[in-house]
Each structure stands twice: as C-alpha cells, then as structure tokens.
Amino acid sequence: MTPDDLRYLRRALALARRGRGRVHPNPMVGAVVARDGAIVGEGFHPRAGAPHAEIFALRAAGALARGATLYVSLEPCAHQGRTPPCADAVIAAGIARVVFAALDPNPLVAGRGRARLRAAGVAVDCGALREEEARLNEAWRHWMATRRPFVTLKLAASLDGKIATRAGHAQWITGAAARRDGHGLRAVQDAILTTAATVLADDPALTARVRGGRDPRRVIADPRLRTAPDARVYTPAERSPLLVTAVEDDARLAPFRARGVEILPLPAPDGHFDLDALMAALGAREVVSLMVEAGGGFAGALLDARQAHKLRLYLAPLLIGGRDATSALAGLGAATLPDAPRLRDAAWKRLGEDWRVEGYVVYP
C-alpha cells in the first residue's frame, strides 16, 4: 500500500462522512477514482435508494475511469438491492484496481464483491484503514451484527451529577453552546428515545434545531399511556412518532393514531419494559442509531441492563447539591467499584463554560 493509496482512501472516508445522518439504514460510503497521481472522480452515498458512492465517482470520472484505480471506504456490493450491484458497474467501467478499507459485514455482500471483481481480472487490495471505517460506521456495524440499535446515552448534569434542583428546576443546566452541540447529535441519529416521565415533566419537542439537519424519529416509552396526544413530542413530522406502550385499549390509542403516531405494543408486566426486548423491537424497525434523552431512572436502568454503548455527558460548572435533587443516574447501580461501567477512549471538549465528555461504555 503506497502513501498515495492511503491518501486517496482517507479521502474516500472523508467523503463518506457527508452522508452522516442521511443514509439510514445503509452505511456511509465514499469513493474516489484516481489515475496518474490525480483524482478524476469522487462521490459519496447520499441516502438510501440513491446510487452508491462508486456510481457517483465513476460517473464523474467518465472515460478516465478505464485503467484507473477506484478507492472505496467499504467493499463494493455484488447483489441487487434498492440499486444494481456496484461491482458490475466497476467492471463495466474498466477499472483496473480497487482498494477498499474494509469488507462489508452484510451477509449479502461479505466478500462477494471482492470475489466478483477478482474473477473479472480486477486487482483488489483491502484492509488498510479498516479501524477508521469501523469507527465511522460503528452504529451500522453493530446493528448488522445484532439487529439492535447502537445506543448513545446523552446526559447533561452539574458537576455533582444533578439534572434538576430539589424544586425540580432544570432549565437550563448547560449553556447555549452545549445545547447546540446536543442538537447536532440528534440530527445524525435515526431515532431519539425518551420516557413518559420526561414528556410529562418537560414537554420536549425532541427536534434537531440544526440548519440543514434532519429530525430523528421520536420514540416515546410509555407503558401505562400517561402522556397526552397533544404533547409536543407527538407533533406530526416527516417520520411519524413511535409510541411504545403496553396499553391495548383502542379507544385510548385512537387520539394518538389520529395524529399519525405509530403504536408499538410491548408487554410491561411490572410497569416497565424489558429493555432488551425494547431494543430488539426498535432494531426490527431498522432503527440503527438511537439516542436516549431521559431522566435518571431510565438512564440508570439502561446502564444496569447493559444497553448503552456510548455516553455523551455535558458537565456544567454548577454545584446544585441537596439530597432531594434529581441525580443524572439512578437505577440499581454498581455494588462495588469493579462492577461499575467505565468509559473507553474518553475525549473531553470545552463548549463555552461547559465540558463535554464522550466515550464508549465498557461493562465489567
């Protein structure tokens, strides 16, 4: 692998990121066509149902693709899905060599693209920058392997871990910069999950107020159907809100359905959902990436059930105090320090007067 190969492959990965939050339920993919030390075509996958990155890059290269090298962040597909096989288009364009960062874990691809290219006489190199590609498409790879969403738990708390005062005052703990950053996270998620308690307490809209961004699908976990159909979270949107409830009374559910809310029935024998069953149900509806914004009880239960994969925590320079103030994490919690989840690859960033810490949750 030459320095030019790595440079063009990194460019393909950078292009792939342009599809973040828009390609659901597909992976982010970028592609570059290069020859004689120059890029002659490039592209990325913009949304599900649109041509893949390779097609855009080949179209941009035109006749210059013949005899050139194609760099792709992910193995070209070899099956008919929403679009024709990319491997066939690569062969037809006369590409002499293909370099891609990682094999596609999708069983419909999984090495078949590589095999088809090689059978047609195309030279193939793969594996460089595979870790970068895996991080880029971490949510999609997790969903592909487990059929459950990759869950990011988002919290905003004071330095002493409180999310509201003893009187219930919670707006706003963090400043404008941190809140804008949180909206940016919403804009790249497939769905955002909250609970009936949060809807009743705050009446949130859970939209992503980001210029050019898109709103995630809103999922409301309300086993006893305590929320009202006129809550802001049920406002009709491009993608209908999803109400998860154990209530099966058609008369009570009718006002929600009238607002375009989809109902997902799920048992809750003790008034609480089994979180693994909830994630399985969301994964079956092609929720690949899921952000959770809820109170301390649900956040703690999520960690207790080992269902959070990533944490984004915003810390404000406040000391709220008080034994009756609301904690960011409740639930059962760890019995001993070795039992406590830890963050791997934690990264800190200053946002105005606040700090953001983000990392992967590792369970003992």
Image (cartoon, helix red, strand yellow):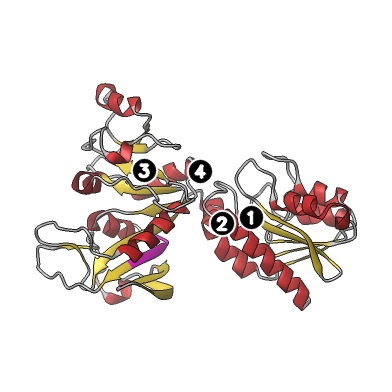
From the image, tell me which residue sits under label 1. Answer: 105
**Residue 234 versus residue 324: which sits nearer the camera?**
234
From the image, tell me which residue sits under label 2. Answer: 141
Upstream in sequence: badge 2 or badge 1: 1
**Residue 239 versus residue 278: which sits nearer the camera?**
239
* Image depth: mark 3 or mark 4 in front: 3
In reply to whether residue 311 is colored magenta, the answer given is yes
Upstream in sequence: badge 3 or badge 4: 3
Dot 3 falls on a residue whose secondary structure is: strand
Give the crowd class for mark 1: few <14, some 14-19, many >=20 residues within 10 Å. some
The Cα–Cα distance between marks 2 and 1, rounded to whole angstroms, is: 7 Å
User: Which residue lies most toward the bottom here?
Assistant: 3
User: Do the numbered discs 2 and 3 sit on residues whose CB atoms are within 8 Å?
Assistant: no
In reply to whether residue 82 is colored magenta, the answer given is no
Amino acid found under the numbered disc labelled 1: Pro
Would you say residue 306 is visible in this rendering? no
Upstream in sequence: badge 4 or badge 1: 1
Question: With 144 as the anchor, is 187 left or right in this view?
Answer: left
* Residue at x-position 55% and y-position 54%: 140
Q: Position of residue 44 (x, y in %)?
A: 66, 54
Amino acid found under the numbered disc labelled 2: Arg
From the image, tell me which residue sits under label 4. Answer: 286
Q: Which mark is residue 44?
A: none
From the image, tell me which residue sits under label 3. Answer: 219
